[in-house]
Image (cartoon, rainbow, N blue to C red):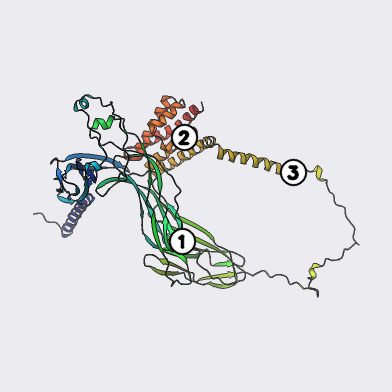
Amino acid sequence: MQSYPKQNISLITSVIICVLMVAFSAESARAQAVKVQASVSSNRIGTEEAVTYSLLVEGSDGTNIAIPNAPPADGLTLLQSVPGTQQNVSIVNGQMTRSFGFTWTFRPTREGTVRIGAGTVTVGGQEHHTQPIDLTVVPQSQMPARRPSADPLNRLFRSPFDAEPQEAPEPSENDIFIRAVPTARTAYQNEQVVVEYRLYFREGIQLRQSRLTDSWDAEGFWREELDVETRPIPRITVENGLRYNTIVLKRAAVFPTRAGEMSVDPLKIESEALLPFGSRDPFQSLFSLRTRFTPVQLESPEVKITARPLPTSAPTSFNGAVGTFAATVAPDRTNLEVGESLQLTITIAGKGNLATMESPAIHVPAAFDVYDPEVTSMLDRSGDELFGSKTFTYVLIPRSNGTYEIPPIEFTYFNTDTDRYQTRESSPIFVEVTGTASTPDVVVATTNGMPVDDFAPLFDTSGDWERTETRSLHILWWPYLLLILPLIALTGSIVYQNRVNRYRSDVRWARGRRAHPLSRKHLKQAMELLNDGDTRGYFEELERAVLGFVGNRMNVAERGLTREQLDDLLTARNIDSALRQRLRSLLDTCDKGRFAPASITPENKEEAFDEASSLIPDMDEQING
């Protein structure tokens, strides 16, 4: 047997252990990534209706999923033992995800509350369990009237295009609604509370033309808007056994300015919803023309927040800051001469009521002149809470030389994590001032209080008078210029005001004037994102450049248009088919670059930029024509 040195054996052992740990970690990560959800088609059914129960498995490639058994049921009977299966593939942020579904159909055997028990799915040898789901079974007379089924022979030989007249269904409160989710129902005065408004809508429902219908307000609060995604991707969630798509409509940080119970206004939106019919015939759902978009008005519930007063044991240095903060104090220099300026910068960073926060009190020696601070704020609105910093810059000017000490500056805030006042104190600052202060001349006063310097000396007439050479103003050029300048300024002001008024009153003209500058701006930003390697952002800017130009030149809201509506508008403006095809091809490339950037090559990016750069002037030429 060949022998190895002890060092090699130790190295080989370490490598094997590392490989096993990596494999175990990867397997654990795969197991942890698996997610199983249970849902039903409706949690309220009639005695003559059926309900579909679904198990959705995410985070698996499908090879290690064992076909599950139907869950037990109380008050329901199973119509088929073999589950229906389906597989979905989606691309989110350039990553492909797969999900696998299993469905069973149950029919109620009695009225009242019935239950479908916990579902069990085995993935990779590990069992995953769901929660039971309760349903309400009511008499069929309490459910909406169902359309009687047509003659089977007529259904068999009828063309799928022969649609029967039927009204579009109205969405119920369980189909689509807005939920307001505050981070807290009780808070201290000036404490940050984030209210998030989420839109819930059932799978299969399509929305369009969503817009706010009322001014949202929060009386008694200081409010700050937080960023939300402009093109959100719906997330799937299960509520009361029903599967919903959810998106965040609005997120705002509110700070109660007084103690007591206060309300945040509901969020109201108008939209148009397309609800799918309940038919299971795929041909009928594919070719039916009986569906249409239905206007819906949605309103979130009112949010009530109780603000508690701050404890009364506040230090004297407390000035209303509530949250969690860090403070720094820094002078720009500590050695200067008399009359020079020193900048003292106080920076407070963290989360809390930065917008309403006042500067900490400073105490400087009497030899310094102190000016009011310059205040700058930087707020980060991209997260789930409002973070940022606020800077107070004081200017100090010494009037005499010497060595001076600026006492420590105290910043006190109420820490919402510990429910206590917390004080941060800077170190003392020593300033060395050199140079000499200018001494004012001594003024001697007369007996009546008048300074002697106020008397002018007597004229001396003994000298000779000299005549100076002067020129009349009418032969000089600059007096005429002074007379003309006000007229030029007045004319320029009138022209400028007329242009501003036209920008405000003539929207079509204003958008047309801004079309070219905005498109060049977006193309420049796209090139910067391309150099930074941001493929998704690059194609978003290309799409904004082209669609924004078309919208501005034609004075239409391009963001709410479908491809077909956009093509109809261009056709109405006599844009030829070849140019419209170029536009559709470029928009398809942009969609591919935004949602599947991994499939885009560098050549595709350059070709897309060249096409956008040439498409804009070509479109402009035909629109003008």
Q: Quadrant of residue 399?
A: bottom right
In screen coordinates, is 478 left or right of 270?
A: right
Q: In this view, does 468 lie above or below 588?
A: below
- Mark 2: which secondary structure? loop
Q: Where is residue 587 in the image (x, y as percent from the top left)?
A: 39, 34
Q: Is residue 59 visible?
A: no
Give the residue at mark 1. Answer: 257
Q: Find disc 3 in the rendering and name its residue.
A: 483
- At label 3, counting other C-alpha atoms closer than 10 Å, the crowd grade (few under 14, some 14-19, many 20 or more) is few
Q: How far apart are marks 1 and 3 (CA)?
A: 56 Å
Identify the amino acid type marked 3: Leu
Q: Residue furthest left?
A: 1
Residue 623 picture location, percent across and down:
49, 28
- Check contact, mark 2 vs mark 1: CB within 8 A: no
Query: Nearest the camera: 353 or 170?
Result: 170
- Tell me the kind of residue under disc 2: Val
Of labels 2 and 3, earlier in sequence is 3
* Image quarter of the N terminus: bottom left
- Mark before the other along the chain sequence, 1 or 3: 1
Q: How far from the left and from the top, in percent, is residue 10?
A: 17, 59
Residue, disc 2: 556
Instruction: State the separation of the CA atoms marked 2 and 1.
Output: 42 Å
Residue 267 — which label? none
Left-right relation of 625 to 278 = right
Work out whether residue 137 can be spotted. yes
